[in-house]
């Protein structure tokens, strides 16, 4: 029986996953989201790039693991935007609010926002992730010349809602029913996207 191991397979490699996460934290911190590469992270962790992909899939998956992002816009946005066009604004608002009503998402999301707002090192990393994985994906799905501006307006509206409702807990928005907020904010998101 051959003792040659296939590259990128985690056979008894205790600690590899942890080394990858630690290496990714350093790479994202030093080079931002856009500057960090899977190859550089693998090199820093002293593993093959295939092992990073095996454990985490994509750079977005690894970043989500490192910073504890509770939502995955890179995965969820295409389904939200590609549904019935006249309901996209409401679906965006409902998706975010229903996610943040889950205690584990709210806890991690609020922590992440507070850290990003208060940290000069963390802000560019989070901005890079959101620019590529959220705004970039919405932009790519919209077929209009000013798609990037529209996507950024959506992101700003939703970020403001999250901060108002879950971080500073400004009343009455903090306790308003989700359906009411969807009905009031959804048309604004819809206008940003399509009008």
Image (cartoon, rainbow, N blue to C red):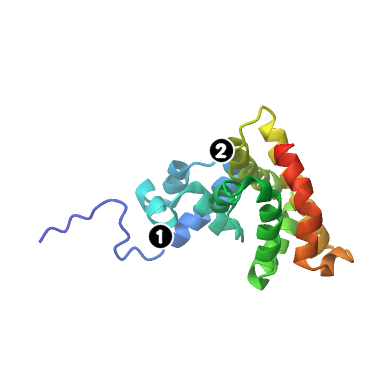
- Secondary element at tag 2: helix
Could you tell whether 178 is left or right of 40 in the image? right
The quarter of the displayed image where residue 34 is located: top right
Residue that mark 2 sits on: 35
- Secondary element at tag 1: helix
Residue that extends furthest to the bottom in the rendered view of this protein? 103
Residue that mark 1 sits on: 16
Q: Is residue 53 above or below residue 31?
A: below
Relative image position of residue 182 (x, y in whole percent): 75, 58
Relative image position of residue 71 (x, y in whole percent): 61, 58
- Foreground residue among 37 and 188: 188
Residue that extends furthest to the left in the rendered view of this protein? 1
Check the picture and name the quadrant holding the N terminus.
Answer: bottom left
- Foreground residue among 61 and 29: 61
Query: Which mark's residue is nearer the viewer, 2 or 1?
Result: 2
- Foreground residue among 89 and 17: 89
Give residue 155's mark: none
Could you tell whether 82 is left or right of 120 in the image? left
Mark toward the start of the polypeptide (2 vs 1): 1
């Amino acid at each position: 029986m051959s003792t040659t191991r296939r590259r990128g397979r985690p056979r008894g490699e205790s600690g590899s996953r942890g080394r990858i996460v630690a290496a990714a934290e350093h790479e994202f911190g030093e080079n931002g989201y856009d500057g960090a590469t899977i190859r550089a992270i693998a090199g820093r962790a002293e593993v093959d790039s295939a092992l990073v992909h095996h454990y985490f899939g994509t750079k977005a998956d690894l970043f989500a693991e490192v910073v504890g992002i509770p939502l995955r816009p890179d995965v969820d946005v295409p389904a939200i935007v590609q549904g019935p066009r006249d309901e996209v604004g409401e679906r965006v608002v409902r998706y975010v609010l229903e996610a943040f009503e889950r205690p584990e998402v709210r806890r991690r999301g609020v922590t992440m926002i507070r850290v990003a707002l208060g940290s000069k090192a963390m802000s560019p990393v989070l901005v890079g992730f959101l620019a590529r994985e959220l705004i970039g994906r919405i932009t790519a799905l919209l077929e209009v010349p000013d798609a990037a501006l529209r996507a950024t307006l959506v992101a700003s509206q939703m970020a403001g809602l999250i901060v108002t409702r879950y971080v500073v807990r400004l009343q009455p928005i903090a306790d308003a029913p989700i359906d009411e907020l969807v009905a009031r904010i959804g048309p604004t998101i819809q206008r940003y996207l399509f009008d």
